[in-house]
């Protein structure tokens, strides 16, 4: 029997008035439909799908051109200031200690498949994934992604060693869903218990593998860190073309931009007023949604989430991306995360 998440379709209370939620898979039929869509044969072709960019999310027509920004304009402070919030500690997986929380999300807008990067986040419900807002919801169409799944540690031929996790609901800021404001290009997706496809009688059946955090652990969260006061490493699966047309990344392996300093940035055309930029990072499309981690410990594979890849930047207008930016993770981002972490998770998927 499949026990499901309750519907989550909007604002929960006055306190959460800036948090907007959308249900992805509500009924057993919804979950089965998503699972059946991502049968092993389709997953084997997953690396050939288009890495999602803000432009691709808005226009389902084939495109490999990222929505890069003009050279960054540094600003002295964010538009809003938030009070300090208690950090969330990272969590090791209960089942093993060598797993990584990072992976890819796969989904559809219109009739075209896309993918992004993402990571599992420590949460009481053990079932939260952090990614970019444009990797889950297109505000210009006022439409959530369809057939949304998270695959941690994906293999190059569609392997899912740590399971497949069907999205249950998206938690995001209302200014992303309503206006496409890139100050809020982040989403926390609550997922159902994971499953693996197991061959049986010439076909495949779903086998429950448990909750996401139990299998791969979860990154912590640290909010309200003023740019310039810390260093951060960015992670993701870049694959798209550089401005000169070259493709140094294939999207099949996890890449990192080494820890570096951050600074404020803005882009008027994208309504970005309090972005945070990491310099000397040549990520291309496909890295969208990948985590920014403070204090990353390589042995444990864990750190504190402080942002997600949102935009690539060609600051010197030459032939190569040279920076990546994230929305500022302040107390408001923490409210969105807490809403996702408060959702009830299903008991099983058998």
Image (tube, rainbow, N blue to C red):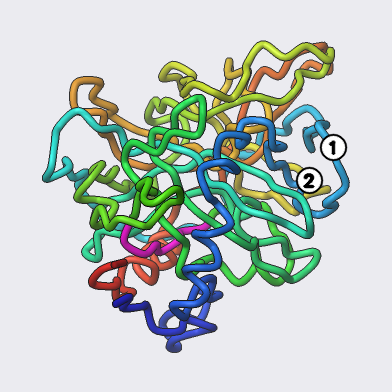
Evaluate whether residue 153 shows in this view: yes
Q: Which residue is mark 1?
A: 63
CB under 8 Å between discs 1 and 2: yes
Question: Residue 18: horizontal and vertical position, in percent?
Answer: 53, 75
* Above or below 335: residue 199: above
Q: Is 88 left or right of 16, judged from the image as shown?
A: left
Q: Position of residue 313 (x, y in %)?
A: 71, 27
Find residue 300 and report its horizontal and vertical position in percent.
Answer: 19, 28
Q: Element at badge 2?
A: helix
Which residue is located at x 21 percent, y 43 percent?
A: 90
**What is the residue that sits farthest to the front in this orientation?**
201
| In-front residue for pair 76/281 | 281
Residue at horizontal 70%, vertical 58%?
181
Question: Left or right: where does residue 56 sit relative to residue 95?
Answer: right
**Quadrant occupied by the C terminus:** bottom left
Label of residue 187 in the image: none
The answer to whether 40 appears left or right of 218 in the picture is right
Quadrant of the rendered image containing residue 100: top left
| In front of the other: 14 or 118 | 118
Q: Which residue is mark 2?
A: 56
Q: Is residue 303 above or below residue 317?
A: below
Residue interval drawn in magenta: 187-194
Direction bottom: furthest residue: 13
């Amino acid at each position: 029997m499949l026990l499901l998440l309750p519907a989550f379709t909007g604002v929960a209370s006055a306190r959460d008035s800036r948090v907007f939620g959308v249900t992805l898979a509500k009924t057993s039929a919804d979950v089965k439909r998503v699972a059946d869509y991502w049968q092993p044969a389709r997953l084997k072709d997953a690396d050939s799908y288009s890495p999602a960019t803000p432009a691709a999310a808005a226009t389902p027509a084939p495109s490999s051109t990222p929505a890069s920004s003009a050279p960054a304009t540094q600003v002295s402070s964010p538009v809003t200031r938030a009070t300090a919030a208690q950090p969330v500690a990272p969590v090791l997986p209960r089942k093993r200690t060598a797993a990584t929380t990072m992976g890819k999300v796969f989904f559809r807008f219109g009739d075209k498949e896309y993918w992004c990067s993402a990571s599992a986040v420590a949460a009481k419900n053990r079932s939260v994934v952090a990614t970019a807002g444009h990797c889950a919801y297109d505000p210009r169409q006022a439409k959530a992604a369809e057939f949304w799944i998270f695959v941690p540690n994906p293999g190059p031929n569609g392997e899912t060693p740590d399971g497949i996790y069907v999205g249950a609901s998206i938690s995001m800021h209302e200014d992303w869903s309503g206006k496409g404001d890139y100050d809020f290009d982040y989403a926390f997706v609550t997922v159902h218990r994971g499953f693996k496809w197991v061959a049986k009688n010439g076909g495949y059946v779903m086998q429950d593998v448990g909750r996401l955090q139990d299998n791969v652990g979860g990154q912590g969260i640290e909010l309200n860190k003023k740019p310039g006061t810390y260093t951060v490493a960015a992670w993701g699966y870049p694959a798209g073309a550089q401005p000169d047309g070259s493709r140094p990344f294939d999207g099949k392996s996890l890449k990192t931009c080494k820890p570096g300093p951050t600074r404020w940035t803005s882009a008027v055309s994208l309504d970005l007023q309090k972005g945070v930029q990491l310099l000397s990072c040549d990520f291309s499309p496909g890295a969208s949604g990948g985590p920014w981690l403070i204090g990353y410990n390589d042995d444990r594979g864990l750190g504190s989430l402080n942002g997600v890849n949102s935009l690539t930047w060609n600051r010197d207008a030459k032939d190569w991306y040279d920076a990546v930016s994230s929305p500022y993770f302040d107390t408001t981002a923490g409210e969105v995360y807490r809403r996702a972490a408060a959702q009830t998770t299903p008991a099983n998927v058998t």
